[in-house]
Image: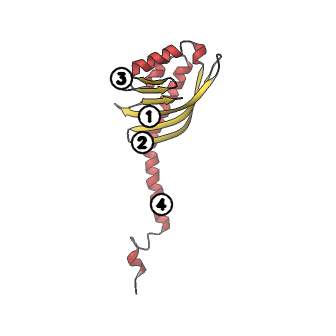
């Protein structure tokens, strides 16, 4: 006759409550580890929104990686590099009427690795010259201890 306990990986006292507690503890540790990074990224986006709404493109751009490898994808195609992205913003939003008031809505915060996150959301510009809006996908990387946008696909 076979003994059932021979097939159990752990003794019988390892019941469902213990397994559930261990699983919740593990998941809680994962959420706790991600929380500071997500909060830091949310702060970058909040700072960008505030800077935009003050009409300060220079401060808005602090959320972007200052590199020729920065990638911005918009309705008119791909823009490569921080300087080109900055000039694009300055050209397209050269007045308070064109800038309007920016509002970000966050849909997903997805950690891709310890130092890389993808954020998906919606943006809305409320303007006297006509409201516009769309969606965005941002890739953030932690570079020298700072979370920065390395890729921005906005449509």
Vertical position of residue 130 compared to residue 147: above or below: above
Mark sitting on residue 112:
2
Vertical position of residue 145 compared to residue 93: above or below: below
Residue positioned 50% across, 14% down in the render: 91
Which residue carries the number 1 mark? 139
Q: In the shown orientation, is residue 108 left or right of residue 139?
A: right
The image position of residue 74, as x and y in percent, is: 50, 26
Which residue carries the number 4 mark? 21
Which of the two labelled residues, at mark 4 and mark 1, occupies the earlier sequence position?
Answer: 4
The image position of residue 8, as x and y in percent, is: 41, 73
Distance from Cα at disc 3 to Cα at disc 1: 16 Å
Of labels 2 and 3, the one closer to you:
3
Q: In the shown orientation, is residue 63 left or right of residue 131?
A: left
Which of the two labelled residues, at mark 2 and mark 4, occupies the earlier sequence position?
Answer: 4
Of labels 3 and 4, the one closer to you:
3
Q: Secondary structure at mark 1?
A: strand
Q: Secondary structure at mark 3?
A: loop
Distance from Cα at disc 2 to Cα at disc 3: 23 Å
Which of the two labelled residues, at mark 3 and mark 4, occupies the earlier sequence position?
Answer: 4
The image position of residue 80, as x and y in percent, is: 40, 23
Distance from Cα at disc 1 to Cα at disc 2: 9 Å
Q: Mark 3 and 4 residues: CB-CB less than 8 Å, in contact?
A: no
Residue positioned 42% across, 18% down in the render: 84
């Amino acid at each position: 006759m076979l003994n059932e306990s021979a097939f159990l990986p752990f003794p019988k006292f390892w019941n469902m409550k213990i397994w559930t507690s261990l699983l919740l503890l593990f998941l809680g540790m994962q959420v706790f580890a991600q929380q500071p990074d997500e909060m830091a990224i949310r702060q970058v986006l909040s700072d960008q929104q505030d800077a935009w709404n003050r009409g300060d493109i220079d401060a808005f751009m602090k959320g972007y990686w200052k590199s020729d490898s920065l990638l911005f994808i918009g309705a008119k195609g791909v823009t490569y590099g921080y300087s080109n992205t900055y000039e694009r913003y300055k050209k397209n939003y050269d007045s308070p009427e064109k800038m309007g008031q920016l509002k970000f809505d966050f849909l997903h915060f997805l950690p891709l690795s310890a130092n890389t996150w993808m954020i998906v959301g919606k943006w809305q510009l409320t303007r006297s010259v006509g409201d516009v809006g769309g969606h965005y996908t941002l890739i953030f990387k932690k570079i020298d201890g700072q979370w920065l946008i390395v890729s921005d696909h906005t449509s």
